[in-house]
Image (cartoon, rainbow, N blue to C red):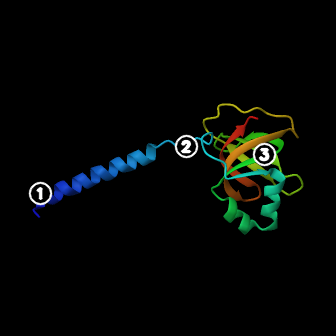
Amino acid sequence: MSRKALIIVTLVLVVVGAGISFYYYNKPTQSLHSLGVDYKLTAKNIFQEFEDNEELATQKYLNKVCEITGLFDTLLSNEQGAKVVLLNSEGGMGALSFELDSTIQSASNYPKGQIITLKGICSGKLIDIIFNRSIIVYN
């Protein structure tokens, strides 16, 4: 293969690679509204599963879409400015933390103890059980 042909093939591969990278980088994430639910639980039940066997619960729920019903505790903002809803674990040391999807413009500050349902992707447990890209499910 001549040097000129090798340069052309290399440039074509670089352009194709850059195009594919650009596509995946800018590809929109699928909304949780349209995703199915893998697990429907109460806050108390999932927190107890993590307390009983964190490794097994992590394997079961990690990166799964969960719909959790529980008692509203707090609405706050994290370091990045995203809204975070905390559900009471109903007896455990910790809470369930739902970082709301960036498409949600506002979130109501419910009365403490009100039962609400949230849908999010489980990221595991630190002190709290963490859910990302969460939405509030209106019944």
Q: Compared with residue 55, is residue 120 higher up or lower down, i.e. above or below?
A: above
Which SS class for mark 3? strand
Which amino acid is tagged 3?
Answer: Leu
Q: Position of residue 25 (x, y in %)?
A: 44, 47
In this rendering, the label closer to the viewer, 2 or 1? 2
Residue sitting nearer the eye, 108 or 137: 137
Residue at coordinates 79% horizontally, 45% vertically from top-left?
Answer: 69
Q: Position of residue 74 (x, y in %)?
A: 81, 41
Whichever of labels 3 and 2 marks the residue nearer the N terminus, that label is 2
Numbered mark located on residue 30 in the image: 2
Q: Compared with residue 52, is residue 10 higher up or lower down, i.e. above or below?
A: above
Which amino acid is tagged 2?
Answer: Gln
Residue sitting nearer the eye, 35 or 114: 35
The residue indicated by pointer 1 is 4
The residue indicated by pointer 3 is 86
Residues at marks 2 and 1, CA–CA distance in whole angstroms: 43 Å
Task: Give the image quarter of residue 34.
Answer: top right
Q: Position of residue 45 (x, y in %)?
A: 82, 56
Which amino acid is tagged 1?
Answer: Lys
For label 3, count other residues whose C-alpha is less than 10 Å away and answer few (under 14), some (14-19) or many (20+): many
Quarter of the image for the N terminus: give it. Answer: bottom left
Whichever of labels 3 and 1 marks the residue nearer the N terminus, that label is 1
